[in-house]
Image: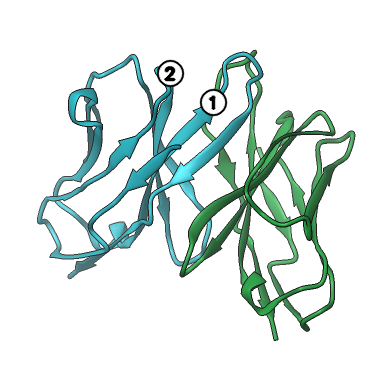
Chain colours: A cyan, B green
């Protein structure tokens, strides 16, 4: 069975602080994908990043960076110099993908609510 | 390019009724997945359709069903509604690149309230 754990239920920071959202996953698959999504109050899940299990390179996109460590089954997300617009719920997800059939289902963590105070 | 469109955005139904939700994927996307989001259970996978066939199904009772049309639009139906079915129902579409998984693009959801 697959599982994604986001232990931080809610984080509150002041604008311009750096913040790291933790994600720990469990899977028996050797091939899998990890994702981060942002959910603003409007409800839509906004895709932020996808990482496959064979690529452990860290990635940086503007103020966002991701640290994938297979040895600890973690895929953490850091926002540098946070802004009020970053306030949202952030979800980490794991893809149950069968390469033979292309079937896909995302297993989501419980989410971390980030509040950035001005 | 238009995003994933879900209709209606809000719905109020009475216990015992049935409801049909609609999802139009991004043009060219053939895979459509449905998720239920509740405060207690979080985001849970319902089912996935590709080329009018259900390819994958989550752990939900048979009251939850879906279908996909030849234009890739999808509907999900919930029969005999229960109070616990109150949730945000999210639809996601994905491009199909061989058998590789790619990111799923989500709609804004349909918020269903059962009273």
Identify the residue at the far left of this view: A17
Q: Is B105 or B85 nearer to us in this picture?
A: B85
> Marks 1/2: CA distance?
8 Å
What residue is rendered at 14% in x and 64% in y? A13
Identify the residue at the far right of this view: B70
Q: Position of residue B22 (x, y in %)?
A: 78, 55
User: Quarter-wise, where is residue B89 in the image?
Assistant: bottom right
Residue B20's place in the image compared with A104, above or below, is: below
Quadrant showing the N terminus of chain B: top right
Q: Is A24 or B113 nearer to us in this picture?
A: A24
Q: In the rendered structure, the residue with mark 2 lies on which chain?
A: A
For mark 1, give the secondary structure. Answer: strand
Counting residues from the N terminus, which is met first, the one under dot 1 or under dot 2?
A: 2
Q: Which residue is mark 2?
A: A31
Q: Which mark is residue B91?
A: none
User: Quarter-wise, where is residue A68 in the image?
Assistant: top left
Near mark 1 (Cα within 10 A), the count class, few <14, some 14-19 or many ≥20, is: many
Q: Which residue is mark 1?
A: A97
């Amino acid at each position: 069975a697959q599982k994604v754990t986001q232990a931080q239920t809610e984080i509150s920071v002041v604008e311009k602080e750096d913040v790291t959202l933790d994600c720990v996953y469990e899977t028996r698959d050797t091939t899998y994908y990890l994702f981060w999504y942002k959910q603003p109050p409007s409800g839509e899940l906004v895709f932020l990043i996808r990482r496959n299990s064979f690529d452990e390179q860290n990635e940086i996109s503007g103020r966002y960076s991701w640290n994938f460590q297979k040895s600890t089954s973690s895929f953490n997300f850091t926002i540098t110099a946070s802004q009020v617009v970053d306030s949202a719920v952030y979800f980490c997800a794991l893809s149950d993908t069968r390469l033979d059939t292309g079937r896909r289902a995302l297993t989501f963590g419980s989410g971390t609510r980030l509040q950035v105070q001005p | 390019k238009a995003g994933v469109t879900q209709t209606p955005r809000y719905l109020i139904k009475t216990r015992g009724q049935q409801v049909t939700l609609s999802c139009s994927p991004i043009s060219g996307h053939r895979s459509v997945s449905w998720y239920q989001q509740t405060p207690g259970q979080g985001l849970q996978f319902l089912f996935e359709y590709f080329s009018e066939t259900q390819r994958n199904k989550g752990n939900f009772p048979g009251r939850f069903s879906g279908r996909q049309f030849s234009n890739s639009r999808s509907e999900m139906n919930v029969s005999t509604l229960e109070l616990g079915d109150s949730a945000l129902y999210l639809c996601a579409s994905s491009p199909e690149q061989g058998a590789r998984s790619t990111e799923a693009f989500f709609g804004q959801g349909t918020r269903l309230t059962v009273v």
